[in-house]
Structure formats: C-alpha cells, structure tokens
Image: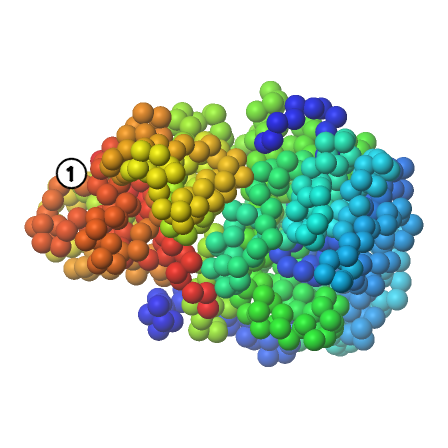
Amino acid sequence: MRVSDLPRPSPERLLRQVQAEESKRWGAKLKIFLGYAPGVGKTYRMLDEARRRHQRGEDVVVGALQGEQSEEVQALTQNLELIPPIQMTAGEVVDVTAILGRAPQVCVIDPLAMKNPEGSRNSYRWQDVQELLRNGISVLTSVNLLHVEEYKDKVQAITGKDTTETIPKSFLLAADDIVIVDVPPDLCLWRQGEKLTATGISNRQERKLSELRELALLLTAEVVDAQLESYVHAHGIEPVFGTHERFLICMTPHSNAPAMIESGKRNKERFQGELYAAYVCEPGQSRKDGAKIRRYFEAAEQAGAATEVLESDDPISAIVDFARQKRITQIFIGNSDHNSWRDRIFGDPVLRLIRAADGIDVRVFPH
Amino acid sequence: MPPDGNSARGILKIYLGYAAGVGKTFQMLVDAQAAAQRGADVCVAYFEPHARPDTIAQVQGLDILPHRKIDYRGKIFEEMNTEAVLRRKPQIALVDELAHTNIPGSERSKRWEDVQLLLNAGIEVWTTMNVQHIESLNDQIWQITGIQVRETVPDWVIRQAAEIVAVDVTPDALLNRLKRGAIYKPEMVQKALTGFFKGSNLGALRELALRQAAHEVDLRQSAYDASSAYQLPRVSEARQVGVADNQPKEHILIHITEEPSTAMLIRRGRRVADYLQGNCTAIFVHRTPQLTGLPVDEREAVEKHLRFARSLQIETRVISAPDIPRAVVEYARQNNVTQIFVAQSQTSLRERLKRRNFAENIVRLAQDLQVTVVADRSRRPAT
C-alpha cells in the first residue's frame, strides 16, 4: 500500500506533528521519565541523564526539584546550576522568566504534575514546561502514573492514594521522548523502607504495585506506538505490522456477530490490543438487516470496539483496505447462513477474504 | 513448565531490552552491587569481555569467575564455565546474554541450557536478553526488521523467570550511544545503522519489548491471584481474568504440514494459546499407512516441525487417514478444540487443481468450529 492511499491524518496527529515540528525548529525536546510508583528511581535516572549531558558539554540547569534529596541524588546535581523556584505563600513555582532569561539548552523540571499557586503566570507546571519548549529550551522531567489524569481513578482504586495534581495523557503522547523506569515491586518497596522479600510477587502490596507497573508499561508502549505512527507518516514508509495485536470484526447481518464480539472483547483484553468492528454498507440492504446491524454496533461499542461503516460495492476489498490502514493483525469473519446472488457468482466470501487478506490472519467463526 | 516440583530450585530473573546497548547488563550489575551490599553472595558467572567502560566499572568488587576457553578451528572462544559455577555455588549468579549459542564442542549447545543446570542446583540466576530472541516473536521480528534471528530462547524458559525487568531507553539515546562508538566498534557502526538500528525498527522493537514485559508481568499476577485469596480492588470496568470468566478454556489445534510456513504457524499458535491461557496441540495427518511411507524430504520436514512443536511444549499427534482436512476437523471435534490453526497455503492454480489447499478445505468442513487461517508473514517483505 502507498502512503497516498492512507486516510487523512486525524486532527490529533496533525496537532502532534505541528507541536513536534515547532519544537524541532528550535531543537527543543521534552523528555519524560515515567514511573509506576514512588521509589522506582525516576528522579535518579533523570538527574543522571542531566549530569551526563552536562559532562558532554550541554548547558544544563535545574529549574525545580522535588522535596528532600538523598545523598545519591545530591551527588548528581552538585555540578549543575540551580535556578531556584519562586517561593510564594501557597507554595513554589518555577521561575520561568529567570530561566528564559538564562536561556540554557536543557532545563530539569521535577516533578511535572504540579498545580501552580494562585496568581502564577501559568495555572499548571506543565504549561510552564510548554513555555520553555516553545522558547527552544529542552526539558527533562518525571511523572508518576498516579498523576496522569486518565489513570488517576485506576491507581486510586488499587492503592487508595488520591491526588489533585494531574497532567493530561495527551501531554505524554505529545512528548518527544518518554522513558519508563521499571523496577520490580519488591525493590520499589524496599527503597521505600520495607523489608526485602523474595524475587517475584510475594504479597498483596507487591501485587498491587505489579498492577500499576503493567499499566505504566502499556502506557509507554502506547506512546511509542503513536510515535511510530507519526514516524511512518512523516517518512512515507509502509506501516509497521506486528508490534501490537489489532482485531477487526466484520459485521454482517447473517453471521454470528455476538460470538465474534464476545471473543473480540476477550482477545482485546488478553492481548491488551485494539478492537475494531466494521460493516460494509452495500446497496439494496433490507430494513430488517439494518436494525440488526445497529444492535450489533451497539454491542461492539460496549465491548470497547471502534466501529466504522464502510461504503463500497466490493465488500472484500473494502474490509482488506480498512484492515491495512488500521494495521490489523487478525480479521474475524463469520460463516454465513445466507447465500446472496453475489456469493453464487463470485464464490464463498469467507474464502475470498482469506485469499485477499495477505499478511493478516483470518479467523472464521461458525454460524 | 518443565518437570521439577523441587522447591529448592533457583530463582530466575531476566533483564529484557530491545537492542544491544540499551543498558541491560549495566542495570543488572547495578542491582547486583546493591544486592552484594545487602550481604548477598553474588558472583559473575559470565560477563561479555568486550563490555563498555561504564559497564566494566559496575563489575568492580564482584567475584568474577574465569571463563572457559575453548579452541575452535584455531581460534579461542570464551564460554561460561558452568561446572566452576556449580562448584562455587553462589547465592546469585550473573549470566549475561541468555540467548547465546555455545561454540561447537561445548557440553550444551545453548547458554539457556547451562542456566537450567544452575537453577536446578538451587542457584538464583540473573540474566539478560533482547526481545528479538524470544522464540514466539521470531516471525514478527522478521516482519519488522527483515532480519531472521537464529539465536532464540523458547518461551517456556522465559516463563520460568520469577521476574522480568524492562530496561528502557529512547531510540535517540541509543543511536547517540551507537554513534559515539559505545556499543559496537567503529567499523560495525555503519552496518548497524543501516540494519537493525535503522529507521522505525528501534521504535517497533521497543514497543514489542514493552508489551512483552507488560504481558509477563500480567502472567505473574494471574499466577499469584490463582494461589491467593486476595482480590485486587478494581475500578468499575472490571477486568475478567482466567478461570473467573465462564468461557470454556481455549484449546488450539495446529495443523502441521511439511511446508516451511509450519514453523511460523507453530509459533503463532503457541503465542495465542499463551495469551489466552489455553492449551495447544499440534497434529500431523499422513495418508500413507506409516509415517515411514512418506518421501524422505517430506518426512524429515515434518519430523523437524514436530520436534520444534515439542520444544515449545506443545503436545503432538500423528495419525494416518485417507482425507487429511476431514481427519483434522474430526480430531478437533472429538477433543474439545476451540480453534484450528492452519497456514494460508500458496494458492497457485496448480495446487488448487490438486485440491491440496488444506486451509480452505478445513474452513469449508469445520463450519461448527473456529478456524484461524494464519497469514504467511514471511512472504511480506519488510520495508
């Protein structure tokens, strides 16, 4: 498939591209270190990078640091210039004016998720970061999963910890670089002062942290996937298949759509994949079939599928083209109890799909 | 998992990365230094002698066991001295590069086999590997990179690990390390930049490694949940796990033929069965009364595929029947198979005339079963 055949990029992707290009014009990059809980060592990794960059001759300053630092962390920052935050009665805020005036190449702002005190230049610290980036200053920062708005409820349900300091997930998706700082739960707890246990999950606390760890790994994979997609579009190369399972259910009024939806949901969960459901609207569809398809669409959406109506007089090509656009790895199709005039002329549509779906698995469901 | 049942078996911990130079060995050594400080008896059983200066600095102070030197065709190669490690019997042994193939003449052909010996002796083993060495990902790796990875580790070995640690770094940082000459010697750098390290490869491999790590973490959670009364508090969109859902357990039947695409089919079937936490069986049907009645090349190819399936801990069945697709479908019906996996056959006119298109025939016959026709990804060249 050629890139010219690909659908127009979504507004989000265009936005991402514009953001990326704008900051690239100045060479400024945002790099975020993501952790699933305190104690994984995000700050250490981030400051170690700051130290190494400084050693290699980059102009690095520190604009904000979190709380009290351990000796190890202090050792990393001892040669770095600090631009102290402004102390206000309600808390501290990054001194954006001073940093812009100093105009370093790289600025460390840690942590990322902070609400600025009333009366600050920006309401949130992530907006301060955007301002630095817009002015050509690269930023190194770190964030905990709990502080990503879309994950807050999940993390709270598991750990009972709540926060009002959050950043939107879209901010992570727009970052130039994201790095996950992964450490097994037992070591994470040990660093928080707990007794060291055997390797692997051995108690409830570790089980809880393990859940957060999985979420953080998958979130990072999602960001990497979005970057990959932008790269593929920007460089006009073929989409990369096979990094991620993506299922597409072909809905027809005469197949066992509920079974396919049920299985699609299960597969989506198990593979942490994506689920799509598509229906090819052909001329001459009956009203009864239309009502059935609408019911199936509702069920598919409830199962977490993105639904799509395709219009074409060649359903097989329409499905295969859609599947390639979405980088589908497996197409679900149902055996039909109903033979149309088309099938009598062109042969069984299931077999035709199997032949056309070169490079994509086809799973045929019984009626 | 291989038979053991021995509670004194050593713990396995794997540092998983997505390319050379991401810092797996470095991270392992940092953790080992911390463990040694806590009083653990750590020894370095195998350490890549061409390591980077940063990494070499991290090994200082640890007990490094001498490698075994093996003369092969006039050149000296270094391998782990497994017997020496067994005699030394440390609490934790560090073994770099799990996927390594030993030089011919070694007792065992793969390093992961040596690691099994250490684990059996009750030694905790920490090791490193890259995602492209996972057996079941072999086809996807080919598809992404265009590179056929030969050194692989079976998935069941990875399943043995009590812990998988993801070692992550951005592709940009990795490329900088590469260009600074911190990963390969200068003459290798250009080759790497146009091969494995090119363009979108690194991003795709990285995504694969992160997803694999998440999956491994998930599997270990399921194992803990199955053995514990504890229920994790969940947000409303509850995730149904394992035995909790009322679906019958998946049972995948892989149809083996002599065609080369069978290897890919076996890997794909194994992987899907693992993710769905189901069973997996492979079947070969021959029309001749005896397997020995097949032409030699065909029989050898089939036997190779059967051995490969067994190495991935898939049960195999070999039966004789006059009609191959019918026999596969009947076996599936009688053995509560939920999905048949068949390879997309080459649909040349000649083959269709010979009515040898197993995939289509099985789909036609098994109208009461799920059939997955697995695409031959090896025919899609990578970009």
In the rendering, at what x and y percent does residue B49 appear? Answer: 80, 59
In the rendering, at what x and y percent does residue A341 appear? Answer: 7, 50
Q: Secondary structure at mark 1?
A: loop
- For disc 1, the neighbor class at 10 Å (few under 14, some 14 to 19, many from 20) is few
| Front-lying residue, B252 or A203 | B252
- In the rendered image, the residue lying farthest to the top is B229
Q: How many marks?
A: 1
Relative vertical location of residue A352 with respect to residue B234 in this rendering, above or below:
below
Quarter that holds the N terminus of chain B: top right
In the rendering, at what x and y percent does residue A209 appear? Answer: 66, 37
- In the rendered image, the residue lying farthest to the right is B61
The reply to whether residue B213 is in sight is: yes
Quarter of the image where one finds residue A292:
top left
| Front-lying residue, A80 or A195 | A195
**As drawn, is A258 to the left or to the right of A247?**
left
Give the residue drawn at x 74%, y 43%: B126
**As drawn, is B90 to the left or to the right of A126?**
right
Give the residue drawn at x 11%, y 44%: A339
| Residue identifier under label 1 | A337
Q: Which of the chains bears the disc numbered 1?
A: A
In the rendering, at what x and y percent does residue A177 appear? Answer: 62, 63
